[in-house]
């Protein structure tokens, strides 16, 4: 893969990434070094950073915590979980010395700004990190879809998918298949037709339609977020 250069990125973090080995909740020993790396990247490189964070460390949706619940109700609870993660991440980032704003798709003015596209772009231009929370504000859509939608809206150069326990995209699960093959580069149609677990089909199609590359890499190695944001050829790129 040739080296890539990004000016504005969306960093997609799973909720589980904030839990660490404990698997549930928010672990300060994980969040603080993560925030320090993101803050250093913002201050030193000038790359404009927006973040979309999931909520799986607090609420797992229909496959877990919400089994048997109405889908819309379960999804709204998941959106609220992402707000909790966003506020924790904002606090850690500001302690690391970088101005941060949380924007939510569900209005809750006491804790965050409502999502306004032009305001988000202005924050980024001023060097602030923007965290997009509460998904799209609608049930039936994942935080992957949020990342793709917000990336299109703010005209991001790429989506960086920081993964736990995975260093890219494979043709099968490397945990169960020792012969699994890692891809360095894929097309959007490869992801959709082969049903590879990068993003859901809606998100992948949105990225395809708006020509937004997706970089999938491991966040378990310190410095990888910085390497990916600076365009080093790590993980797998979908374009």
Image (spheres, rainbow, N blue to C red):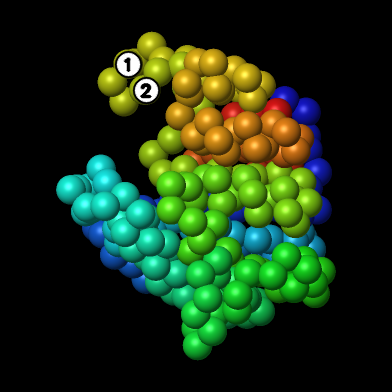
Neighbour tally class for label 2: few under 14, some 14-19, many 20 plus, Cα within 10 Å:
some
Kind of element beneath mark 2: loop
Q: Can you see residue 222? A: no
User: Dividing the image into 4 quarters, which one contains the N terminus?
Assistant: top right
Q: Assess whether mark 2 and mark 1 are in contact (beta carbons under 8 angstroms).
A: yes
Q: Nearer the viewer, residue 204 or 168?
A: 204
The residue to which callout 2 is attached is: 174
- Asked if 140 appears above or below 191 in the picture, the reply is below
Q: Nearer the viewer, residue 186 or 115?
A: 115
Residue 50 position in % (x across, y down):
65, 61
Q: Which mark is residue 54?
A: none
Residue 219: x %, y % from top left = 49, 47
Image quadrant where residue 115 sits: bottom right
Real-space CA distance between mark 1 and mark 2, rounded to the nearest whole angstrom:
5 Å
Q: In which quadrant will I find the C terminus?
A: top right
Residue 26 found in image quarter: bottom left
Counting from the top left corner in percent of width and height, residue 200 is at 49, 34
Q: Which residue is mark 1?
A: 177
Task: Answer left or right for 4 relative to 33.
Answer: right
């Amino acid at each position: 893969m040739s080296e890539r250069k990004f000016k504005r990125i969306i960093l997609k973090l799973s909720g589980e990434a904030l839990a660490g080995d404990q698997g549930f909740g928010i672990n300060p020993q994980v969040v603080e070094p993560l925030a320090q790396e993101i803050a250093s990247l913002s201050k030193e490189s000038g790359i404009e950073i927006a973040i979309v964070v999931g909520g799986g460390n607090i609420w797992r949706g229909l496959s877990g915590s919400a089994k048997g619940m109405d889908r819309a109700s379960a999804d709204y609870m998941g959106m609220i979980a992402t707000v909790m993660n966003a506020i924790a991440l904002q606090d850690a980032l500001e302690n690391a010395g970088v101005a941060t704003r949380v924007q939510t798709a569900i209005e809750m003015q006491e804790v965050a700004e409502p999502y306004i596209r032009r305001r988000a772009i202005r924050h980024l231009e001023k060097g602030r990190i923007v965290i997009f929370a509460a998904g799209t504000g609608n049930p039936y859509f994942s935080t992957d879809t949020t990342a793709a939608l917000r990336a299109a809206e703010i005209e991001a150069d790429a989506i960086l998918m920081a993964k736990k326990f995975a260093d890219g995209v494979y043709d099968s699960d490397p945990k169960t298949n020792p012969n699994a093959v890692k891809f360095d580069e894929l097309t959007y149609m490869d992801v959709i037709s082969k049903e590879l677990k990068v993003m859901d089909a809606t998100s992948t199609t949105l990225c395809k339609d708006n020509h937004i590359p997706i970089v999938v890499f491991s966040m378990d190695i310190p410095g990888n977020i910085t390497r990916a944001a600076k365009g080093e050829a790590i993980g797998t790129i979908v374009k």
